[in-house]
Image: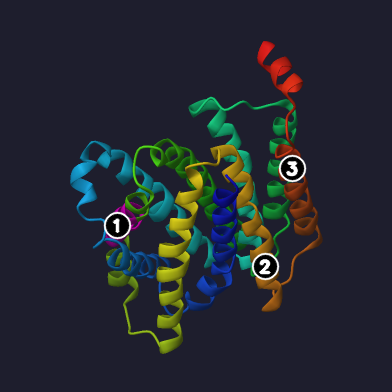
Amino acid sequence: MFLGRLAMIAAVFIWGSTFVITKSVLDELGPFCLAALRFGLATILLMPANINGFTEYRAQLRQLAMAGFLGVSLFVGLQNLGLRYTSAASAGLILGSIPAFTLAISAVVLREPLFASRMLGVLASISGTALVVLGNKGKTSASSFVGDVLVLSAAICWAVYTVKSKALAGRVPQSLLTASNMGFGFLFLLPASILEAAIQGFHIPPIKTWLAIAYLGAVASGAAYSLWNYGLKTVSAAEAGIITNLTTLVAVLAAALVGERITLPQAVGGVLIMAGVCLASMPVTEAQSKGEMDK
């Protein structure tokens, strides 16, 4: 379990760096074109070694396709689109709500226990997220609000993906799960990226943009998703959601390094989110667990 946690922590540190990198290239590429290129590269790198697995595990193809749609196409597509309108710091703070959604969905779908301390943590995280969204004064309030809502929608998609992938992680090899995430995610992104290019036009981006795509595709997609799916084999979906919250810390620190500012309400919201996550991740004693289960 220790190695699983370590793998997931490494993944979220990589993902935390992607907000600033993604935002820096959105002036050169549309959000869906960028996502398609990112996961197209990851598919090229991962698919050859896993292509035969799709025949062996064809009974799980529908579930694999849904995981790719939720955890890649919708999550990254909505996140990229949101980053066009809001700041990297705000996006990172909002994604701190993922543990709250993951805990709630895990309780319903996987019947993982939702104890009183976790419920209180969920409420604190949701309250903090509301402060982050309402306290965002970047660009214009209207456009920032739209961007924040898009990123929040992405967070919900990732929470559902985590729960769905937890159910798959014990039945499908980790390498196949990661490759299918990339492949199906890429396929579902293609129509949106083609439509986006047809409407906005497409030009060959500069070298720095290709370097960013290489990092996003090979490291933040292929490597990080592999680490995450490896961890899901031994870590509960609820705990995975809590680990995800480290992305917030890395994203905010990276945004601060490039000069982005956080408003006071957003800072307070960030503290509430982190406090809620800490509360939700507190260990539950056997007596507490039995008491909750008996209610």
- For the residue marked with disc 3, what is the amino acid? Gly
Q: Main secondary structure of the magenta part?
A: helix
Q: Secondary structure at mark 3?
A: helix
Q: Position of residue 72 (x, y in %)?
A: 40, 55
Q: Is residue 191 left or right of residue 231?
A: left
Residue at the spot of label 2: 138
Q: Earlier in the sequence, mark 1 or mark 2?
A: 2
Q: Is residue 228 left or right of residue 143?
A: left
Residue at the spot of label 1: 183
Q: From the viewer's side, name the closer residue of 20 and 293.
A: 293
At label 1, counting other C-alpha atoms closer than 10 Å, the crowd grade (few under 14, some 14-19, many 20 or more) is: many
Looking at the rendering, the stretch of residues picked out in magenta corresponds to 179-191
Q: Is residue 85 visible?
A: no
Q: Quadrant of the C terminus?
A: top right
Q: Which residue reaches farthest bottom?
A: 207
- For the residue marked with disc 2, what is the amino acid? Gly
Q: Is residue 28 above or below residue 168?
A: below
- Measure how far apart labels 1 and 2 are at the Cα level: 35 Å
Residue at the spot of label 3: 276
- For the residue marked with disc 1, what is the amino acid? Gly
- Count of numbered labels shown in the rendering: 3
Q: Earlier in the sequence, mark 3 or mark 1?
A: 1
